Image (tube, grey):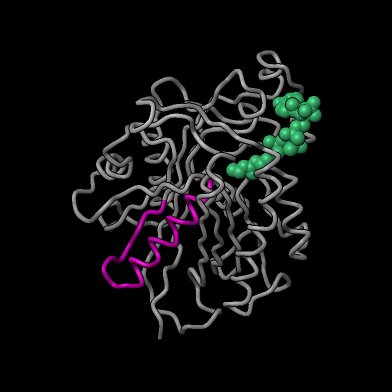
């Protein structure tokens, strides 16, 4: 017998305002054709004035709890991944905890940028497997619109706002890959790559929130190799391969990175969930947002084998293999 962290429910939330490529083309020197061709992004959602990361996260968490049929009072752990917290402190997770009316257990944030959801899932899994906690909310939530330089066409066209959440519950399994739940996680980081993707401000440097800066081509060059490495690690650890996978739900940064990674791993194109066209890159929220789309439209069903992966600033990167 082996304890497993099983996904009981999923939910997401997108701000109502949609910004199209045409709207951006009226603002900076770009075109719908360039953005579509280079990234696959057609539109992104942008939070309204006063709509914060904790508000998006709370809506996603409420949806996940409803989908799981679990009351907020049954949650004893909240792990929230974000690079755009409401405040420098306290942790955005504690605001979500308060919004949900939870006063027991523990809530904290994870900073791994676009890899945040995979890092948060892996962290929550370890808490559940240790026996210290029973039911977790794992949330990825971002308002990247607040840290974009809206005059920089090389970055402002790429990102969007949103939140996604899953309810994770400790259950007993057999210890085989037939178990439901998180079957493996592989996390990596390498701080030598800081300058390729970073925010040029912070409490202990400029005293401001700063703006996102990225050497896109450099990130692209590393992304496919790093992503495929941690997926190959997951395959080796579990005996699963590209053919036995049901779904590949990658971080949604760029359609070209997603398809190149799937090609390199021999994952069939029809198994790849792509939402970057509608959501843009929502950083830590992108994987749970994509998962929610594929669960709610009936593609991902209980028992399916799902591979998640992400790469983000740091660099940080990682994979998670989950049986739904
Ligand atoms: O989620 C975290 C991880 N982030 C990523 O994975 C992002 C990784 N990088 C990328 O997705 C791609 O590198 C980008 C989409 C950011 C850029 O695509 P690219 O094919 O690497 O283009 P590039 O940066 O090499 O730029 C090509 C040209 C440049 O002009 P020159 O130097 O060739 O004259 C850019 O100035 O495109 C120009 N350009 C634009 N043109 C129109 C850059 N941004 C734009 C734009 N509209 N928005």
Magenta region, mostly helix, strand or loop?
A: helix
Q: Nearer the viewer, residue 81 or 147?
A: 147
- Give the image quarter of residue 308: bottom right
- Quadrant in which the C terminus appears: bottom right
Bounds of the magenta segment? 114-138
Q: Quadrant of ligand 1?
A: top right
In the picture as drawn, the residue positioned furthest to the top comes out as 26
- Quadrant in which the N terminus appears: bottom left
Q: Nearer the viewer, residue 141 or 206?
A: 206
Eyeballing the image, is 319 above or below 18? below
Eyeballing the image, is 311 above or below 127? above
Q: Is residue 309 found left or right of 76 in the rendered image?
A: right
Q: Position of residue 135 (x, y in %)?
A: 33, 62
Q: Is residue 270 found left or right of 112 in the rendered image?
A: right
- Asked whether residue 277 appears in the rendered view, the answer is no
In the picture as drawn, the residue positioned furthest to the front comes out as 192
Is 314 inside the magenta-drawn segment?
Answer: no
Q: Position of residue 141 (x, y in %)?
A: 45, 41
Q: Position of residue 243 (x, y in %)?
A: 73, 72
Q: Position of residue 180 (x, y in %)?
A: 50, 73
Eyeballing the image, is 238 above or below 281? below
Q: Is residue 228 found left or right of 159 in the rendered image?
A: right
- Asked whether residue 198 appears in the rendered view, the answer is yes
Is 122 inside the magenta-drawn segment?
Answer: yes
Q: Residue at x 52, y 37 (%)?
A: 198
Q: Is residue 102 found left or right of 174 in the rendered image?
A: left
């Amino acid at each position: 017998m082996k304890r497993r962290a099983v996904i009981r429910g999923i939910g997401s939330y997108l701000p109502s305002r949609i910004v199209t490529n045409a709207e951006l083309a009226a603002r900076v020197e770009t075109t719908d054709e360039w953005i579509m061709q280079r990234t696959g992004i057609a539109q992104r959602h942008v939070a309204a004035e006063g709509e914060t990361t904790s508000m998006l996260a709370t809506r996603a968490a409420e949806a996940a709890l409803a989908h799981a049929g679990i009351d907020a009072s049954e949650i004893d752990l909240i792990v929230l991944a974000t690079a755009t917290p409401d405040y420098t402190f306290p942790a955005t997770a504690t605001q979500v905890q308060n919004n949900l009316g939870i006063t027991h257990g523990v809530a904290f944030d994870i900073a791994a940028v676009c890899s945040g959801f995979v890092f948060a899932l892996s962290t929550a899994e370890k808490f559940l497997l240790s026996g210290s906690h029973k039911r977790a909310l794992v949330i990825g939530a971002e308002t990247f619109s607040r840290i974009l330089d809206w005059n920089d066409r090389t970055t402002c066209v790429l990102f969007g706002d949103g939140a996604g959440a899953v309810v994770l519950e400790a259950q007993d399994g057999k210890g085989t890959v037939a178990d439901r739940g998180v079957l493996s996680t592989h996390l990596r980081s390498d701080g030598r790559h800081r300058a390729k993707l970073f925010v040029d401000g912070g409490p202990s440097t400029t005293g401001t929130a700063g703006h996102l800066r990225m050497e896109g081509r450099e990130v692209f060059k590393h992304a496919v190799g790093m992503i495929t490495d941690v997926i190959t690690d997951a395959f080796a650890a579990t005996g699963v391969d590209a053919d036995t996978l049901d779904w590949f739900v990658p971080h949604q940064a760029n359609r070209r990175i997603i398809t190149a990674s799937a090609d390199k791993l021999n994952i069939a194109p029809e198994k790849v969930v792509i939402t970057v066209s509608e959501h843009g890159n929502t950083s830590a929220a992108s994987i749970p947002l994509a998962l929610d789309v594929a669960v709610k439209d009936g593609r991902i069903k209980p028992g399916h084998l799902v591979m998640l992966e992400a790469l983000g600033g740091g660099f940080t990167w990682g994979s998670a293999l989950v049986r739904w």
